[in-house]
C-alpha cells in the first residue's frame, strides 16, 4: 500500500505548551517480512499511552497506542501464521518508530506476537488481551523477571499486588492456570471478581494491616508481582516477602519506584516489548534483543486462543468510548482523573 495515507492521532509538542495529539493524514506503514498489515477496527487504551504523551517520551510526530484488533490486508513474505482476511489481535510499541502505533487506521502485527481472535469473544474483548496478558505472562516466567518454575504447581504462592488492574486480572488467571496458590490485593468491590478468576486469598490494599494479614495467611512468600508500580506500592508489597528473601517484579520499566523495598527483596521488572526480537530504548533505559523472551512470547500467543476459547482465561471487561479516534482525548483524561476501575477503555474506529 505504498503511497497510500491513513488517519492517525499524531503527537504535537508546541513550544511552551503541553504535548497533545491531533488527527492527521500520514503514510500507511509497510510490513516487514515477518509482519502483517492490519486494518484496525478496535484499539485498547493502556496507561503507557498517557504516560508517553504526558512525559513527551517520543517527541513530535509519534503515533501512540499499543493494543489493536483488525483484519489482515497484506503479509510479509516470512509470515506463516497470519493470512489475508484473518481477524487478529496484536500489539506494537506506539511511538517507538515514527508513524507506527495503534491509534491509527492501520498498524503492523508480528507473525509470532499476535493471534487470531477466537469466535467466542467480541472484538471489544479481544483487544484488551495482547499487552496486558503478555505482560503478566512475562512477569511470572521470564528469566529476567520472577522466573517462577512452571512445573511447581501448588507448591508456589505468588502475590499479585493490584489484582483488579488489567494486568493483575490476567496475572491471577495465568498463575491459576499453572496451579499456583494466588494471593491478591484490590478494593473490596472487586473481591468477588478476582476470586472468580482464581485468587485463593484476597485482601483490601487500603487495610492498614494488609501485609500482616498476607504473611499470616501465606507464610514464607517468595514471589510478588506489583502490577501498579506506584510511588509506594512496591515498597508496601515487598514487606510481605519472607525474611529469608524473595523476588518482586514491578510493572514499571527500569524498576522505577522500588528504592524503598525491603532489604531481602530482589527487584526485577518486566517490559512486554522484550518479546519482540529487537533492541529497545525508552529514555535512558535500554533493552537488548532477547531470544528467550521472544520464544516465551511466541509460546504464549500459541496457547492464548485455546485458553480463551475454552474459558480458562477471560478477557478484561471493555468499556467502549464513543467517537473513535475523536474520543481518545476523553479516555486519556479519565485515566488522569483516576476513575477507571475494573474495566479497560476501548475505541472502535
Image (spheres, rainbow, N blue to C red):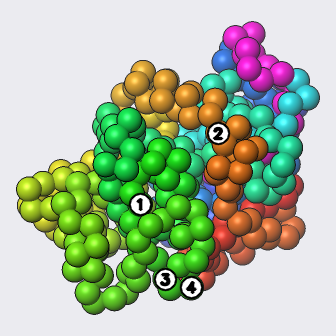
Quadrant where the C terminus sits is bottom right
**Label 4, residues with CA under 10 Å away: few <14, some 14-19, many ≥20:** few
- The x and y percentages for residue 119 are 86, 44
In the image, farthest residue toward the bottom: 208
Answer with mark 1 or mark 2, whichever residue precedes in sequence.
1
Looking at the image, is 87 positioned above or below residue 263? Answer: above
**Label 2, residues with CA under 10 Å away: few <14, some 14-19, many ≥20:** many
Q: Which mark is residue 187?
A: 3
Where disc 2 sits, the SS reads helix
Quadrant where the N terminus sits is top right
Q: Gap between marks 4 and 3, in whole Å? A: 5 Å
Q: Gap between marks 3 and 2, in whole Å? A: 28 Å
Q: Which residue is drawn at 28% across and 73% down?
A: 217
Residue bounds of the magenta highlight: 62-83
Between disc 1 and disc 3, the foreground one is 1
The answer to whether the residue labelled 1 contacts the one labelled 2, judged by CB atoms less than 8 Å apart, is no
How many numbered callouts? 4
Q: Residue 92 carries which label?
A: none
Amino acid at each position: 500500500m505504498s503511497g497510500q495515507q491513513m488517519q492517525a492521532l499524531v503527537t504535537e509538542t508546541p513550544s511552551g505548551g503541553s504535548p497533545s495529539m491531533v488527527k492527521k493524514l500520514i503514510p500507511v506503514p509497510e510490513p516487514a517480512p515477518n509482519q502483517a498489515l492490519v486494518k484496525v477496527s478496535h484499539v485498547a487504551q493502556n496507561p503507557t499511552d498517557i504516560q508517553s504523551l504526558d512525559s513527551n517520551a517520543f517527541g513530535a510526530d509519534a503515533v501512540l497506542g499499543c493494543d489493536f484488533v483488525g483484519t489482515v490486508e497484506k503479509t510479509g513474505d516470512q509470515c506463516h501464521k497470519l493470512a489475508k482476511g484473518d481477524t487478529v489481535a496484536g500489539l506494537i510499541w506506539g511511538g517507538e518508530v515514527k508513524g507506527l502505533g495503534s491509534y491509527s487506521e492501520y498498524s503492523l502485527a508480528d507473525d509470532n506476537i499476535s493471534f487470531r481472535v477466537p469466535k467466542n469473544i467480541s472484538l471489544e474483548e479481544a483487544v484488551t488481551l495482547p499487552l496486558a496478558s503478555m505482560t503478566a505472562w512475562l512477569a511470572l516466567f521470564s528469566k529476567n523477571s520472577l522466573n517462577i518454575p512452571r512445573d511447581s504447581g501448588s507448591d508456589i504462592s505468588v502475590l499479585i499486588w493490584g489484582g483488579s488492574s488489567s494486568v493483575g486480572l490476567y496475572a491471577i488467571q495465568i498463575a491459576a492456570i499453572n496451579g499456583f496458590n494466588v494471593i491478591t490485593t484490590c478494593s473490596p468491590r472487586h473481591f468477588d471478581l478476582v476470586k472468580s478468576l482464581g485468587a485463593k486469598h484476597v485482601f483490601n490494599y487500603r487495610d492498614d494491616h494488609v501485609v500482616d494479614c498476607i504473611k499470616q495467611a501465606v507464610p514464607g512468600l517468595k514471589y510478588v508481582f506489583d502490577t501498579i508500580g506506584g510511588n509506594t506500592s512496591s515498597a508496601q508489597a515487598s514487606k510481605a516477602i519472607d525474611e529469608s528473601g524473595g523476588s518482586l517484579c514491578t510493572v514499571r520499566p527500569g524498576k522505577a519506584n522500588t528504592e524503598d523495598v525491603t532489604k531481602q527483596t530482589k527487584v526485577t521488572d518486566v517490559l512486554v516489548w522484550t518479546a519482540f526480537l529487537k533492541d529497545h530504548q525508552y529514555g535512558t533505559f535500554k533493552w537488548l534483543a532477547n531470544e528467550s523472551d521472544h520464544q516465551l512470547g511466541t509460546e504464549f500467543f500459541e496457547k492464548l486462543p485455546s485458553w480463551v476459547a475454552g474459558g480458562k482465561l477471560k478477557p478484561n471487561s471493555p468499556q467502549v468510548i464513543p467517537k473513535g479516534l475523536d474520543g481518545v482525548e476523553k479516555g486519556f483524561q479519565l485515566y488522569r482523573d483516576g476513575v477507571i476501575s475494573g474495566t479497560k477503555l476501548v475505541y472502535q474506529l
